[in-house]
Image (cartoon, rainbow, N blue to C red):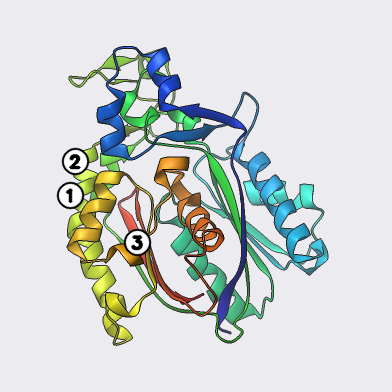
Amino acid sequence: MPARVSHIEYVLPDRVVTNEDLKRAHPDWNMDLAASKTGVLTRHFVKDGELASDLAYRAVGQLLRTTGTPPNAVDGLIFCTQSPDYIMPPNATLLHARLGLSSGVAAFDITLACSGYVYGLAIAQSMMDALGLRKVLLVTADTYSRYIHPDDRSALTLFGDGAAVTLLEPAASPSQILDFSLETDGRGGDKFWIEAGGLRVPRSTETAAARRDIAGNVRSRETIWMDGRAVLAFAEECIPSSVRAVLARRALDVSDLQLVLFHQASAVALSRLHELLAVPPDRQFTNIAQVGNTVSASLAILLKDAERAGRLRRGDLVLLVGFGVGFSWGCCLLRW
């Protein structure tokens, strides 16, 4: 059964942190330089006690009200996050209970990050095709601020928290998901990770010890560590060929698309990908300045903002590209 993206809603935490706020807290940080590299001017961080599932619950409630969808009509729930409430049970089951969904709902988590939205769309469409599901909620929510050392300039200036929910329904003219490319290079796993806290490297006094690197960033083995140059090199090497392959299968070119939407990784990454794929300015859209890199929620938030801005209309041909932790990446071609 072909599927379509029917509706998207998202929620950002109420706490807004501007570059000026960070400068006041860290007078030695060059925020102009940070902004030029990340592209981020403001970001939203959760408050104490606020979790990804809380943001997701608000976003789903917003979507159900806006679309007039009764909870008992939902028959699939996929929750993509790398910041779950517990080791077990999955966030999808927690959200299932809070929403009062029926026991006939297939509900589960996936743990991908910046490619998670594209992978989630592929999984949802496959389930609709195999099981005849009619209304699937794809929740993408992350609170990376929980994983960032407060003195880590590289991560604190880049990431933001947020949750989005996408309603997938059977395709209806002209809207339809058309094609996917899903790829992985696990050799890049240690280029963007949190080393300690799992079963391989349990937390300890040693893993909690913070260290300052040569660039002045402070991290421990329990907080996010990212090799920005390696991540950028991976994106430059892998993303253009994947995009071209998906378009070639449909005998399309970038010029045939109304929008090419990339995961909002950083200003530097977006600039390079737009350049490498010769994406014209009128086919670009970004929101990283306002929300930062919101990880798995990034592409869904971007789609919604493009629609609100009048840059995305029903019938438009759109390419979504997610990439990051893993290394993992994917493309989705859809008719909005």
Residue 159 figure quarter: top left
Three-letter amino acid code at disc 1? Ala
Q: What residue is shown with label 2? A: 229
Residue at image point 79% right, 65% down:
68
Residue at image point 59% right, 82% down:
171
Percent across and percent down for residue 141 are: 55, 46
> How many angstroms separate mark 3 from mark 1 (CA)?
21 Å
Q: Are marks 1 and 2 in contact (CB under 8 Å)?
A: yes
Check disc 1: other Cα within 10 Å, few if <14, some if 14-19, many if 20+: few
The kind of secondary structure element at disc 1 is helix
Q: Is residue 162 visible?
A: yes
Mark 3 vs mark 1: which is more N-terminal? 1
Q: Is residue 151 above or below residue 185?
A: above
Q: What residue is shown with label 3? A: 284
> How many angstroms separate mark 2 from mark 3 (CA)?
23 Å
Q: What residue is shown with label 1? A: 233
Q: Nearer the viewer, residue 128 or 47?
A: 47
Q: Are marks 2 and 3 in contact (CB under 8 Å)?
A: no
Q: Nearer the viewer, residue 301 or 325?
A: 301
